[in-house]
Image (cartoon, helix red, strand yellow):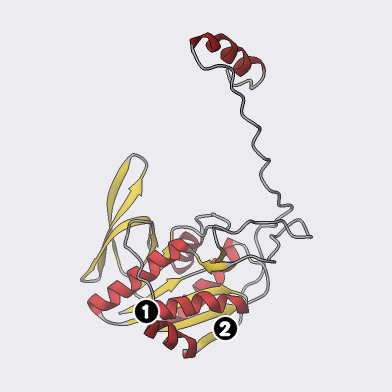
């Protein structure tokens, strides 16, 4: 079985983000980058599937030279092969999906894992776009998965509950938190990852469908106000909610 997992290089959630001088991107100075947390569930699912059914695992990433950091992390976890579609261009979701789909079409994997979203742009689009471009089914926000006899049975989250979905291979699976617990790389894996080669590819598509016009930080929250500590404050509270906050 050939198992692909697509990963991305994103700012750490603990990073204090600043807007760059161009007003359209973040300032990379002092920013720590990590493998997208949701993609780690995809990596773990790929590794567990290989351990159960055998085969080869391949990680793919679209990004700069620095994206090799996350490829090394995937190697350290146990991924067999890594492909970096190397570009310094800032690509939107469509362009990223197009580049991934072109390589995946050549690789022809049986199953392709993604995280349900990346934590930088949060578009939730790339996995579904790739499935459409490859003309194969996709199942998103997956929290349970069984692969047997050329068919997947997936449990996915929906509003107010969960549903069970079946599909034939090949298929795209977008992993949600709860699907598994990603393993920590051991020392042997970390050391081996340093010497593993990362195949580099040139992008096949660099025309974005969207353009970032401006980027800004959220407005700071207004200071809170305490109008009283007992029932006598209710009248004043209602007045402020109506006249000042204008929410009632």
| In the image: residue 64, left or right of residue 34 | right
Q: Residues within 10 Å of mark 2 (few under 14, many from 20)?
A: some
Question: Split into 4 quadrants, where in the image is the C terminus?
Answer: top right
| In the image: residue 16, left or right of residue 21 | left
Q: Is residue 108 visible?
A: no
x%, y% of residue 83? Answer: 50, 81
x%, y% of residue 229? Answer: 52, 17
Q: Is residue 128 visible?
A: yes
Q: Can you identify the residue that label 2 sits on?
A: 201
Q: Which mark is residue 186?
A: 1
Q: Residue at x 60, y 76 (%)?
A: 66
Secondary structure of the residue carrying tag 2 is strand
Residue 48 position (above or below residue 19): below
Q: Residue at x 46, y 70 (%)?
A: 6
Q: How many angstroms separate mark 2 from mark 1 (CA)?
A: 29 Å
Q: Which of 224 and 87 lies nearest the eye of the viewer?
A: 224
| In the image: residue 53, left or right of residue 16 | left
Which residue, as the protein is rendered here, is positioned at the far front? 229
């Amino acid at each position: 079985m050939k198992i692909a997992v697509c990963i991305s290089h994103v700012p750490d959630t603990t990073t204090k983000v600043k807007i760059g001088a161009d007003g359209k991107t973040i300032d990379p100075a002092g920013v720590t980058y990590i493998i997208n947390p949701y993609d780690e569930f995809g990596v773990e699912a790929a590794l567990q599937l290989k351990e159960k059914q055998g085969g080869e695992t391949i990680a793919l990433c679209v990004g700069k030279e620095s994206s090799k950091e996350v490829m090394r992390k995937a190697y350290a976890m146990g991924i067999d092969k890594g492909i970096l579609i190397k570009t310094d261009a800032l690509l939107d979701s469509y362009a990223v999906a197009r580049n991934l789909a072109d390589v995946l079409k050549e690789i022809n994997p049986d199953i392709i894992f993604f995280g349900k979203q990346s934590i930088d742009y949060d578009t939730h689009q790339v996995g579904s776009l790739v499935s459409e471009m490859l003309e194969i089914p996709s199942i998103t926000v997956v929290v349970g998965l069984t692969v047997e006899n050329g068919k997947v049975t997936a449990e996915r989250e929906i509003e107010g509950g969960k549903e069970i979905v079946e599909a034939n291979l090949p298929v795209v699976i977008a992993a949600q938190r709860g699907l598994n617990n990603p393993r920590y790389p051991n020392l042997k894996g970390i050391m081996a990852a340093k010497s593993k080669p990362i195949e580099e590819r040139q992008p096949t598509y660099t025309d974005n469908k969207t353009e970032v016009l401006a980027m800004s930080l959220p407005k700071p929250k207004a200071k809170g106000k305490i109008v009283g500590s007992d029932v006598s404050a209710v009248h004043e509270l209602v007045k402020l909610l109506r006249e000042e906050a204008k929410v009632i």
